[in-house]
Amino acid sequence: MEVENQLSTWDGYVDWKNKPAIRGKHGGMLAASFVLVVEVLENLAFLANASNLVLYLDEFMHFSPTDSANSVTNFMGTAFLLALLGGFLSDAFFTTYQIYLISAAIEFLGLVILTVQAHSGSLKPTKCNPATTNIPCQQVHGAKAAMLFLGLYLVALGVGGIKGSLPAHGAEQFDGNTPQGRKQRSTFFNYFVFCLSCGALFAVTLVVWIEDNKGWEWGFGISTLTILLSIPIFLAGSTFYRNKIPNGSPLTTIIKVLVAAMLNTCMARSPSNAIASMATSPSPTPPSKEEGTIENHDKVVETFESPSQSLKFLNRAVINKPTFDTLKCSVQQVEEVKIVIKTLPIFVCTVMLNCCLAQLSTFSVQQAATMNTKLGSLKVPPASLPVFPVVFIMILAPVYDHIIIPFARRVTKSETGITHLQRIGIGLVLSIIAMAVAALVEIKRKRVATNSGLLDSTKPLPITFFWIAFQYLFLGSADLFTLAGLLEFFFTEAPVSMRSLATSLSWASLAMGYYLSTVIVSIVNSVTGDSKHKPWLSGRNLNQHHLERFYWLMCALSALNFLHYLFWATRYKYRSKGSN
């Protein structure tokens, strides 16, 4: 009876009451469906303001175009970077279930502050008209600026916690030791990106229109109510969730192995201080059922007799007599750290793509604002342009999951059909094309401005904003391939004890992309500006910028980055079953 009871539980998982999770009762697609619904609402709350924030800072807080673009990229970069904190806490001290609830409450508080400021004229800078010199436009400062950034970065903290916990929470609902569970998990990641797009669709259409036509207090208010609504919906799935028990700080393991390897390398080698168990076998001896693992319900336990020969410098962490007892490392810990290190080059290679994606919420929005945004009698807000990639992703995601992947599985005779790294590579190629298209569209836009005599004017140009849609479509497609591929790659490749933190690297890549965008813009302005020439990206009039040169530069950097990616991707060896 005791054995039967043990077999009926998910080893390493508990329910919301901290009791052992039961097989057949907890986990599965039903539990993950609550996560998908919550992701629609969460992303709506976040993107409703992030997609249009550059114009809010420009028009109401009187930032310059470059300052507003950099402020948005810094805000979004911080939000995604804080996903690492959410992932770390989910692995180390709390469950993903708990981290989501805490983070949603923090984001709610930040949105309340932004709503109050947007509603009260006394909390914003004095209105001004850039065309007149009587009332100078003064950028927000002092206590008003403090309130703005307090609200923004509370939102960023909340978003980071949610991004770091919610994808891993959904993926943990599936049994990774069965082909059906792995396929369902892959479907979950595809539909997670689909739900991201659903939230974005409402954000960049309905909410952005309300912000532009009814006032920003309404837009912030809708976001506040949306994130508040997500909390009871998430709680409604509590009885179905299985929550991974925190295994302690993964960073502690990583730091301990690295420090032990460095200190032990400095020690004189002796027979009594040899690498543990090296005489037993020169490499790991895997069990027969699955390479490097044994199955224990859903919990995959790594089994190694001795360190592998890859990244051999870390093997010095495993010796019979370490420098300090606190630095004593097991072979399993060393191999887990090796796995994490091997995934880092893939992470680095996706940063440039996300730097390109950053342009969707900055310069691309400003480009559209200078063009004819009328669709019949309807004036389309420039920040609604992301509707093009959003709709395309919503169409492509189900097609990819139900048509492309099954066909690829039959052709390649593999479980995944298209490997995670192949999927990421497709996204990188699409980003190169997107930047080339963006440069060509900007050349056409400025030619229209010159021919119309509006180069020095702020009036709308006689060219439809639909031209901008082309770069959005390519970047949107790149985002679908890369983000879903990265989320699944990091989750499946990472050790069980580090999955939330590893999955957060997908969002950290976005963060690094936004920060890199800010750095590149600053460097470009510094290098191209001198006493005779204005910097490429300075001034309030976008027509005076050399944005097309900036896009060509991004295209060239993306091409070089893709070559860098190929170097690492072709050398990477998958560790998990179902990854290749």
Image (cartoon, helix red, strand yellow):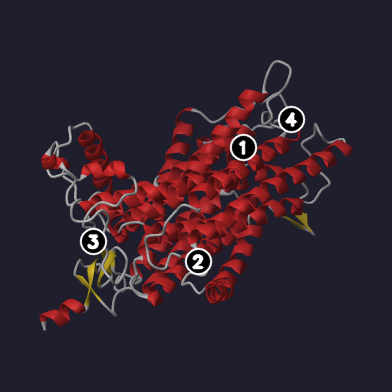
Counting residues from the start of the chain, the first of labels 1 and 3 encountered is: 1
**Numbered disc in front, either 4 or 2:** 2
Mark 4 burial class by Cα count in 10 Å: few <14, some 14-19, many 20+: few
Counting residues from the start of the chain, the first of labels 4 and 3 encountered is: 4
Residue type, label 2: Asn
Q: Which residue is mark 2?
A: 190
Residue type, label 1: Asp
Q: Which residue is mark 3?
A: 303
Gap between marks 2 and 3 measured at Cα: 31 Å
Percent position (x, y) of residue 504? 40, 52
Percent position (x, y) of residue 212? 64, 50
Identify which residue, 383 or 352, lies in the foreground.
352
Gap between marks 4 and 2 measured at Cα: 48 Å
Mark 1 burial class by Cα count in 10 Å: few <14, some 14-19, many 20+: some
Seen in the picture, residue 110 relative to 545 is either above or below; the reply is below
Instruction: Report if residue 576 is visible in the image.
Output: yes
Instruction: Report if residue 158 is visible in the image.
Output: no
Q: Which mark is residue 58?
A: 1
Identify which residue, 321 or 183, lies in the foreground.
321
In terms of secondary structure, where does tag 3 sit?
A: loop
**Numbered disc in front, either 4 or 3:** 3
Percent position (x, y) of residue 168? 37, 60
Residue type, label 3: Thr
Residue 292 in the figure: left or right of residue 34: left
